[in-house]
Amino acid sequence: MRTRTAQQMTKTKPETYTVYEFGGFTCGKRVGGYQSLPPDTFAALESFVLENRTRTDYTDYDGADTIELMGCTSKKGIGEILTARNYVGTVTLKDGTVIEILPKIGKNIGAERTKEIFLRMLAALPDMNFKLSEMANLDTRRMNIYEIFIRMFLQEALGLARQGLRSGYTRVERNECFCKGRLLMDRHVRRNAADAAHFYVTYKKFTPNRPENRLLKSTVLLLLKQTSQAENNRLCRELLTHLEAVEESRDIDGDFAKCVKSRATVHYEKALNWCRVFLKRKSFTAFSGEQKAFALLFPMERVFESYVVRALRRSGLFRSVLEQDESKSLFTDGGYLRPDIVAYRRGDAYPLIMDTKWKVPADRSKISNADLYQMYAYGARYKSPLVLLLYPLAGADPHFKPYHTHKGAVPCVTVAPYFVDLEAEEATMAKSIFAAAKQLTPIGAGSGKP
C-alpha cells in the first residue's frame, strides 16, 4: 500500500503579493522599487488584465463602459511592468496566488495600519455589510483583505447557525413507503402498478433546506476551497456541521430570487449580502477570465467620497448632507451638475459644496484649470460662496492657497483645496473640515435668503 509523505500531505500555502496604488509588478526581478512576481504568476495576472481591458459587458460603479485594473507598460532594462490603478482590493488567481492592492493613505504607515484605515473607510459604503466592531479581533498582519472578508462572512454565518437556522415548509414529491399529503394518482399508477407497498405523494416538509440556507452552504463550500488561512478553514468546517441537513444550491440565481425579506428572515440579510459578493461576485467591479481569477476591487474615488459623507453626517455639524445631488443644471434642457457633496450648515441659507479627489495634485502649488472650471460651475449654480476640493493628505503639502473670483464678480465664489487626514478619527476629521470651511467662507456670505 502506497503511503503519502508528510510533504505531500501538507497543503502548500498560496503566496500573497502586496503592492500599493501606482506601484507595479515586474517579471522575475525586483528593480526600481517594483515588486517581483514569478514568471508564471506574472503571465497569469497579465493575461487576466489584458482580457478584462477589452471587455465591455461589465460596468463599474459609476457606469463606465470599460474598467482598467492595471496599466501594462514596458521599460528598457526592466521589461514588462504591470502598474496598479485607482482600484484597491484583491485578485485571486487560479492557483490560489493573491495579488493585494492597498491604497496609498499615508506617507510613513505600514501595511497593517493601511488595512485598518481602508477597512474603516470601506465600512462607509452602502453596499458593504460590516461594522467596525467586527474587525476588532482580526489579526490583519497575517491576513490579506480577501481573507478578512471571508472571516467577516464566516463570523456572521456562525452567529446565525448558533442561534438556530430558520426552517420552513418545502414541497416534496416522492415515492414513499407511507401515504401522506396528496396522492398523485397518475404517477402512482405508472410507478407502483405492481408495488402495493409504495405511494407516490406530494406533501410539505418542515426542514432547514430552504433557499437562504442553501446559499449559505454553497458559499461556505466555495470559500473552503479558496481560503488558505487555518482559522478560516476551521470555521468553514464548523459551519458545515450546522448545515449538514441542507443541500447545496443547484440554482443560485433562482434561490436568491426566492429569498424574500420578512420579519422571520431579517437577520439573514447581512449574511446573504456577503453570499452575493462571493457567489455572484457582486462588488464594485466584476472581472473574469480564462484564468478563472476572482477580483474583489473597489474604486478609491467612491470609497473616499462615501467615507467623508458618513463622517459629516455623523458629526451633527450639518443639518443636511446630500451625496451626488442632481437638482441643478447648467441649461434648461440638460447639462445636469452632480457635485459629490452638498452640505447645509446650521443657520446658512446657501450650501457648502465639496468635491472629493482621490489623487495627489501633480502640481502641488496650484489646482488644475479643469478642476477650477468644474468647481466654479458648482458654486455659481448652487449660489455657494465656498467650494472645497478634498484631497487625501498622503504626505502632500497641505498649504494650498484658496482661489477667489475677481472683486465685484457675480457670483462671488471661493475655491479652496483641503487635505483630509485619514489617520484621524471620523469625528476629528469632520470637525477639521467644518472648521476649515468656516475659516475660508467670506465674511457675510452664506447667510440671508437664497
Image: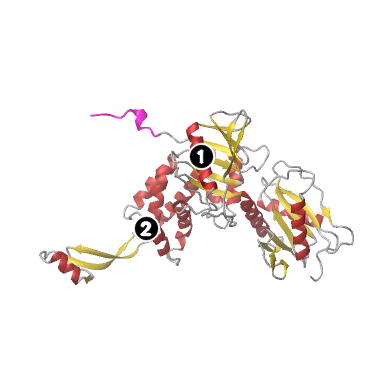
Return the x and y of residue 97 as percentages of the image width and height. 47, 38
Which residue sits at x=44%, y=49%?
154
292 left or right of 175 in image: right
Quadrant in which residue 14 is drawn:
top left
Mark 2–mark 1 distance (CA, rounded to whole Å): 30 Å
Of the 4 image quadrants, the one containing the N terminus is top left
Return the x and y of residue 86 as percentages of the image width and height. 62, 46
Please report the bounds of the magenta region as a residue range: 1-11
Residue 64 sits inside the magenta stretch: no
Q: Residue furthest right?
A: 407
Q: Which type of secondary structure does the marked residue at label 1 adopt?
A: helix
Closer to us: 381 or 302: 381
Residue under numbered circle 1? 45
| Residue type, mark 1 in image | Leu
Q: Residues within 10 Å of mark 2 (few under 14, many from 20)?
A: few
The answer to whether marks 2 and 1 mark residues whose Cβ atoms lie closer than 8 Å is no
Residue 8 sits inside the magenta stretch: yes
Disc marking residue 251 = 2
Q: Earlier in the sequence, mark 2 or mark 1?
A: 1
Mark nearer the viewer, 2 or 1? 1
